Image: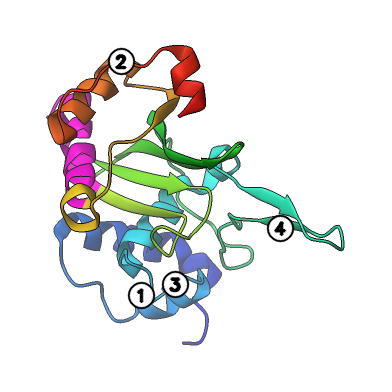
Amino acid sequence: MSQPVAALVAIYELDTIEAYLSKKRPPAYLGDFFDALEIPSDAEATELQIAVAQILLRRIQDQLPQWLTTDPDGVRIAGRLRHKRPPAAESLTFEPKLIYGIDWAWSAPGLGWPETYYLTHIPGFDHYIVTASRDSDEPWGCTDHAIGKFAAQVPVLDGARRVITDYWQYQRENNCQARWASSISEGLADRHTADAWADAVWGPHEELTDDEEAEA
């Protein structure tokens, strides 16, 4: 098929999520669905990770990090584009909850590298999925991707901590990623909790004053 049938989109979404939770290779027929969603095939994250995040975050995408500028002709340029979906498609509806938001670094005044983490419960599978979202596709080749999962029986903050710290640890070990520079939003986790998670990955650091943090 060249395009998924609109009425079947919810089924494709469910199959995508099931493939991610089961750690099985996605069925071949989902390739057409990923094409319809315009999932990049050359990102550091897998197509499955990106597709899962787009499905889970679709209803809140206007709340996700966004980078905007204007070119010399006055045309607005956005770092984040809206998620694609087949026309007239009936999609699954999820309720992502913000865990925490950070800024990795400030390249210049007003120019940072924000990343927010959301937690979504998956009814029927008794699991949560954690996603990471950025304001452009520069770091990972995509703006959103799933970074981990855990069973619903696990306390929410314990599961979120394990997934997010594993994600940070991977970046520290493979990309020489330094500790994030500042907090931008609190959700299920507060700043004290997120700092403790970061300490477990990069080691304790001296607390910055508000003025020092603004200059970082």
Q: CA distance from mark 4 to mark 2?
A: 36 Å
Residue 68, position as x, y percentages in the image: 68, 49
Mark 3 or mark 1, whichever is nearer to me: 3
Q: On the picture, is 142 further left or further right than 169?
A: right
Tell me whether the residue at label 2 lies in contact with that at label 3, contact meaning CB atoms closer than 8 angstroms: no
Report the disc number at residue 207.
2
Q: Main secondary structure of the magenta part?
A: helix
Q: CA distance from mark 3 to mark 1?
A: 14 Å
Label 3 SS? loop
Q: CA distance from mark 4 to mark 3?
A: 19 Å
Q: CA distance from mark 1 to mark 2?
A: 47 Å
Task: Name which of mark 4 and mark 3 comes first in the sequence.
Answer: 3
Position of residue 205 relative to residue 136, above or below, is above
Mark 1 or mark 2, whichever is nearer to me: 2
> Mark 3 sits on what residue?
40
Magenta highlight range: 148-170
> Mark 4 sits on what residue?
77
Label 2 SS? loop
Position of residue 10 relative to residue 111, above or below, is below
Q: CA distance from mark 2 to mark 3?
A: 39 Å
- The amino acid marked with disc number 4 is Ile
Task: Name which of mark 4 and mark 2 comes first in the sequence.
Answer: 4
Neighbour tally class for label 4: few under 14, some 14-19, many 20 plus, Cα within 10 Å:
few
- The amino acid marked with disc number 2 is Glu
Q: Is residue 152 visible?
A: no
* Residue displayed at 20% across by 21% down: 196
> Mark 1 sits on what residue?
30
Task: Name which of mark 1 and mark 4 comes first in the sequence.
Answer: 1
Q: Is residue 176 visible?
A: yes
* Residue displayed at 40% across by 33% down: 102
